[in-house]
Amino acid sequence: MKMVINGEWVGSLSDRTYTVKNPANGEAVGPAPLGVRDDVKRAADAAEEALSRWGGTSSHHRGQILTRAAARIREQAEEIAIILTAEQGKPQREAIDEIRGTARVFEYYAGLSSNLTATVQHLEDGSEATVMREPIGVCGAIIPWNMPALLMAWKVGPALLTGNTVVLKPATATPLTPLMLAAALHDVGLPNGVLNVVTGSGDEVGEEIVRSKQIQKVSFTGSTQTGKRIMTLAAHDLKRLTLELGGSDPMIVCGDADIPKAVAGAVAGRFYNAGQICTAVKRLYVVDSVADQVIEQITEKVGQITIGDGMKPEVKMGPLSSLQGRESIRSVVRQVVDREEGRVIAGGELPQGDEYIRGNFYTPTLVTDVVPDSILLREEIFGPVLPIVRVKDLNEAITAANSTRYGLGASIWTSDLKTIRTAVSGLKAGIIWVNQHLKIPPEVPFGGVKESGVGRENGLQSLDAYTEAKTVLVRL
């Protein structure tokens, strides 16, 4: 598969390609161009040339294209999901859910087309103020490998609706799904140059997107470390930024919680997509009075998780996306055991069997008796490992939950309204769930505090993130 620049499917100017591999078995999924800086330049040129034409169309027209794209994506959901599973590893049911969610995001933004009208105010001195929303310009979008379809829609949807053009870089591990989505958009009438997709490394393609003087805004989802570098590079030209970065999301289970639902929520919240989600449950705090019950039930449920190739219908958890990711998880668990930072009560090893030899598999892992300064509680662990910590009460849980540099999401499980209010007030996070975890509908703003990011995606706030306000004062 080739890159998309100015509506054409092209190779890299370097003439180099690389092979996308299936993390379940190491087999080739397909080739992708290894883009270079000059590829970003020609993509930015195409986006810049298309900007005035696209931005000059009505928001209603742009919304119609997003509606048609959503319909096309729904038609092709199973076909795209097969590619998503092949290059990313997640089970087919999760892949299909992601593709359908992608269509839902485009439908949501299409429905906001009427929200882009100018506002008029009559001032006390008799003058009139009109506030218009105009496109920022050419926008760069850099997306990760864990949710490549959904996160592409989060960035491309609002950017296109508001009249911007886009240069998008998918992750090197998962370029094929975003390219299929770009094809769907072009199939339903998206003009040439409005959306350009350049595949390649972050060091070359990603950095050039951030450095390019033609690109006025960058939206990035990925690690906090990379986000800080992007912020540094973007400061030179005062680029607009949206950064959705790392997270170490806590889940708090109180004594009055519905325990079976909380256990199910913890298992789904940690082991969905093999734990490779920014907002996954990464730390579980349980009040002492119900801790034994929660640990017993969660251990039983984790033992029922079938791991394997995501194309098999019985599989509930696929491989990690890369060997490096698997070895990082393996190293962390070994460190925890060697330093006596916690006790592994489930998993903590590579699965046994011929079907796992070539894949990046790791068993779902539970760790109890975790010490407060353990790496499991300090850093973001991007894989299927869940530390469980006993706390004496809600206040101790909130203090522990806030004791990291991250603040992306958090959840509280309780049946008491006062407890909910205390937790919502006390937890430092961009999104707080009550008796649920992970769900992020496109209608609500999403983003983090502290080192979990800058700005918000989704919701009406995303329209502000992709437009500039122009105020016109008139006195007649």
Image (cartoon, rainbow, N blue to C red):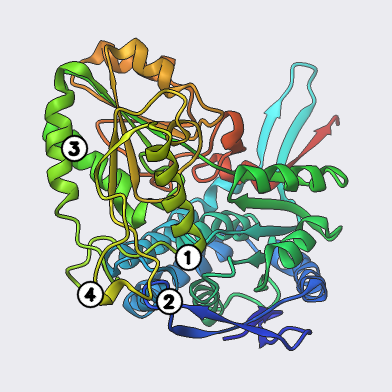
Residue placed most toward the observer, 458 or 402? 402
Disc on the earlier residue, 1 or 3: 3
Q: Amino acid at mark 2?
A: Asn
Badge 1 is on which residue? 323
| Residues marked 4 and 1 touching at CB (< 8 Å) | no
| Residues marked 2 and 3 touching at CB (< 8 Å) | no
| Image depth: mark 4 or mark 1 in front | 1
Disc on the earlier residue, 4 or 3: 3
Q: Position of residue 120 (x, y in %)?
A: 68, 34
Badge 3 is on which residue? 263
Q: Which quadrant of the rendered structure holds the C terminus?
A: top right
Separation of marks 4 and 1 at Cα, in angstroms: 21 Å
Badge 2 is on which residue? 22
Dot 3: few (<14), some (14–19), or many (≥20) neighbours within 10 Å? many
Q: Which residue is pictured at 31% across the width and 62% down the height? A: 94
Q: Amino acid at mark 4?
A: Lys
Separation of marks 4 and 2 at Cα, in angstroms: 14 Å
Disc on the earlier residue, 4 or 1: 4
Residue 110 appears anywhere in the view: no
Numbered mark located on residue 312 in the image: 4
Q: Which residue is pictured at 38% across the width and 72% down the height? A: 359
Residue placed most toward the observer, 249 or 376? 376
Disc on the earlier residue, 1 or 2: 2
Disc on the earlier residue, 2 or 3: 2
| Residues marked 1 and 2 touching at CB (< 8 Å) | no
Q: Give SS at disc 4.
A: loop
Q: Residue 215 sits in which quadrant? A: bottom right
